Amino acid sequence: MSHRQLIITLFTFLLFSSVFMVAAQDGDEPLTVGFAQVGSESAWRIAFTNATLEEAERRGINLLFVDADNSQDNQITALRSFVEQGVDAIILAPIVETGWDQVLQEVHDAGIPLVIVDRNVTADPSLYITRVASDFVHEGRLAAAWLAAETSGNCNIIELQGTAGSSAARDRQAGFNEVMALFPNMHIIISQNGEFLRDEGRRVMRAILQTEDMSVICALWAHNDDMAIGAIEAMKEFGIVPGRDILTVSVDAIPDIFGAMLDGEANATVELSPYMAAPSFDAIETYLAGSEVPAQIPVLGELYEPDTAAEEYAARTQSN
Ligand code: GYE
């Protein structure tokens, strides 16, 4: 081999090996994903967080997790921190719908793909690649339809609302009211905010029980199970038998609501799956691979009653 051929061969080898190393590094580099979570306000939220951490670990994703302690300001700070760190993608579980336009524009301008998960935002949908969520309106409709069937359309209801300004509270209420309007003898006679919190559900229900005539109340409709559990505890303090004197219907399908069903103290729950991480990570990986991602990725749930509470409780306490 001539001196010239040797140099060309050596140069070609070095070129390909450097390209290969870059490719290998790109291929092996774990994704870094920032996740701005609402907080840990309910058992469902904690289950959702745990499932997301487990899914990230299973996939070898480097997840930068921020629990915003129910503060939008903390979530916005977290998003800006993720941008500064140059993460590969961001997942946002927005606490409320409004107030995101500026920071989502910053994320978009940084070229970082964003997934909205669970509750919705009013910001321009072009600022995020998809939203992974259940249908909150449908959950409200299911709850009202069950109650109408259970009471033959005759029921005075106490409603415990979720976080004001959240799409979950607004849409669950809208869905419930849409069905209730079909039944002239179904009325929500008291509606108060329990912030999706168990302690607030208990506190608000105690106050209602102290001032209102409960003999006319037929059911409690709570936007999540945690508030229903708190209200159930308050009912028992006042000698009311929850699940019998006052029926309960709520949303999330957390283990404790099935435990209450087994005690005869709760009657129905609509499931909200905590497993939203896999479709979120799939969407990010699909997008980064240069493929199309659907604008909405639905997560479905169904209504559960006491007849399946034993197996649901066992299944959900084992998996968490
Ligand atoms: O029902 C509740 C949590 O955003 C739909 O938030 C979610 C709700 C869920 O606090 O437990």
Image (cartoon, rainbow, N blue to C red):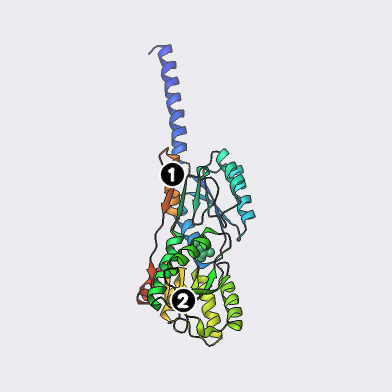
**For this view, does 82 lie left or right of residue 185?**
right
Query: How far across and how far down the image is residue 16, in percent?
Result: 42, 26
The residue under label 1 is 285
Residue 217: x, y in percent?
Answer: 50, 81
Quarter of the figure that contains the C terminus: bottom left
Which mark, by number, is residue 269? none
Q: In the image, 318: left or right of 188?
A: left
Evaluate whether residue 1 shows in this view. yes
Q: Which kind of residue does numbered mark 2 sit on?
A: Thr
Closer to us: 277 or 24: 277
Q: Which residue is mark 2?
A: 248
C-alpha gap between disc 2 and disc 1: 41 Å
Q: Position of residue 271 (x, y in %)?
A: 42, 66
Comes first in the chain, label 2 or label 1: 2
Work out which quarter of the rendered image holds the N terminus and state it.
Answer: top left
What amino acid is found at the position of numbered circle 1 in the picture? Answer: Glu
Residue 273 seen in the figure: no
* Residue at x 58% of width, y 67% of height: 195
Residue depicted at x 52% and y 58%: 167
